[in-house]
Image: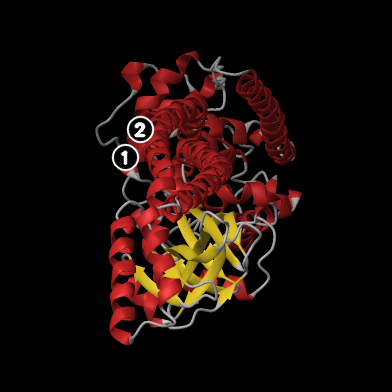
Amino acid sequence: MSYGRRPPRLVVKAVAVTFGTVALLLVLVFLVVRMSVRDQVRQTVTQNLDISQRMLGALESRRLHELRMQASTLAENPTLKAAMAIYVTEQPTAGSAAGARLLSTIQRELDKLSARVDTDAVSIATPDGTMLAVTGRLASAWRASGSWARTDVDESGDALVDAGDTLFRVVRVPLTLDDGATIGWLELGTAFNARYAQELDRISRVRTAVVNGSTLVATTLTRSQARDFQAALRGAFRGIDPLDLDGGAHAWREIAGIGSVRIYALSSVDEAAAATLSRLNLVLAGMAGGAFTLALLGSLWLARLLSRPIEQLSSALEQMAAARDLTKPLPATGSSRELDLLTHTFNHLMTSVLDAESRTEAAYAGAIRALAAALDARDPYTAGHSERVSVLSVAIGRVLRLPEADLEVLRFGALLHDIGKIGISDQVLRKPGPLTDEEFEAIMEHPVVGARIIRTIPFLLPHVDIVELHHERPDGRGYPKGLQGDAIPLLARIVHVADAYDAITGARAYRQGRSSADALRELWRCAGTEYHAEIVGALARALPRMLTTSVPARCVDLTARDVRTDAPEAVSA
């Protein structure tokens, strides 16, 4: 019988469920820990950025203050003031050559002073703002603008100067004489360029960006990050929520500002979390490996703990089914209360089934014996005939070492072998004299009638062959089908010999019963033609063993010395 795809074993299912549950829990823990660490890193980055904001803000304020102090100190240089005073006094009347010498003197003095300060440009201008001399790293960019566009001048004199491609933050201090007259301006410019942003980056170790209005002037962000930041500047740039720059979250803070210029510090949450998450991944991987190993071992142990008693119970049931022995109760495993309760319930059920089966078999046997007794009661001369034939048949079957199941079929089939005689009239059945040909033909119909009767009863079907074929002969001259030799079922052959033996030894109205020895001689005389020789031999071996059985005396009055296994002499019927 095919049951389709076989389901997995219980141990496999238990391991799969346990291991899968642990794996799912570990994955959930892994995700929760990662999210928690990421949030913690984000908070840490934000806190560090706040610290950097305060530090850079303070640093910028200090640098700006120092720059103002330096500018004030330089503006008090007597040589520079003297050169500037001479230029202001003589320039209107001096020729071009004299004017050039005066500017050269101012430039030379300015070059000397610029070495004292760390700034991108230092310049001298007239009171009306006309540039006279400039020096410093970005002097060319400062000078290239020609006339300056000073914007956002605050009360301290600081201003923004847009000198072409470079935006400068300018500290301006006046050059004054002792009488307080202003003869010019000394200006120190700091460029908002990449160098400035990189210096802030180096100090704070965070990304920086300088923005003028909505335009990114300088930054240490990557090109793609700068592009996204520029887009954010043009959009709704509000609050302090992290910005998404090139697919990564960045926290940001404003460090300082002057006019329209704002300086920002930015820190990547993902970059800060990468190292932490990398270490965390290694730790979690080790923990997961250990947890998976323990889970696998634990699930295997649990699965075996659960499945072993069930397998034992299943194996016991299999052995019981194979042996067809329901009398031996299943032992309790003692592994769990539930399995022991299941075993107890099964044993109780089997006890009930066996009890019901016993009652059914008793009713079955009683019904068959009642039918046989009803038949035998019609003729006092054949009373007990069916019972005796059944006993003899079973004895022959035991000599032939038939299985118990076949012996049961033989026992009840022999009881029913003449059931078809129910349909024969008492006049024929109890006739004291020989039968006529017509009467004998009526008698010959009883196997067919009996088979027809028991075929209508399902639980009697195994006995049909005995009822129908117990008058067949090895030579083919039997009835109703005229079967020959081994074509006749073995059980029918046995009943045929036992039936003949009881008929010969039993008394009839028209003759006396003959002895067992005579009956055996008659059976041996006809062995091979009317009876099967091996069945006759089995009967001969069985009769001595039946001396202590309940077979009627006339069936077992043969002693061991009366049993002849050689071909007996002919005895007339």
Residue 32 point in image, percent of width and height: 57, 42
Relative depth, front residue between 572 and 558: 558
What residue is drawn where x is 71% and y is 30%?
356
Q: Is residue 149 above or below residue 275?
A: below
Q: Are marks 2 and 1 in contact (CB under 8 Å)?
A: yes
Relative depth, front residue between 131 and 379: 131
Residue 254 point in image, percent of width and height: 59, 55
Q: Is residue 339 above or below residue 197?
A: above
- Amino acid at pointer 1: Glu
The answer to whether 419 appears left or right of 13 in the picture is right
Relative depth, front residue between 441 and 309: 309
Secondary structure beneath dot 2 equals: helix
Q: Which mark is residue 534?
A: 1
Residue 188 point in image, percent of width and height: 44, 61
Query: Can I make out residue 558 in this image?
Result: no
Secondary structure beneath dot 1 equals: helix
Tag 2 residue? 538
Q: Furthest-left residue in view?
A: 566
Query: Can I make out residue 186 in this image?
Result: yes
The answer to whether 130 appears left or right of 523 in the picture is right
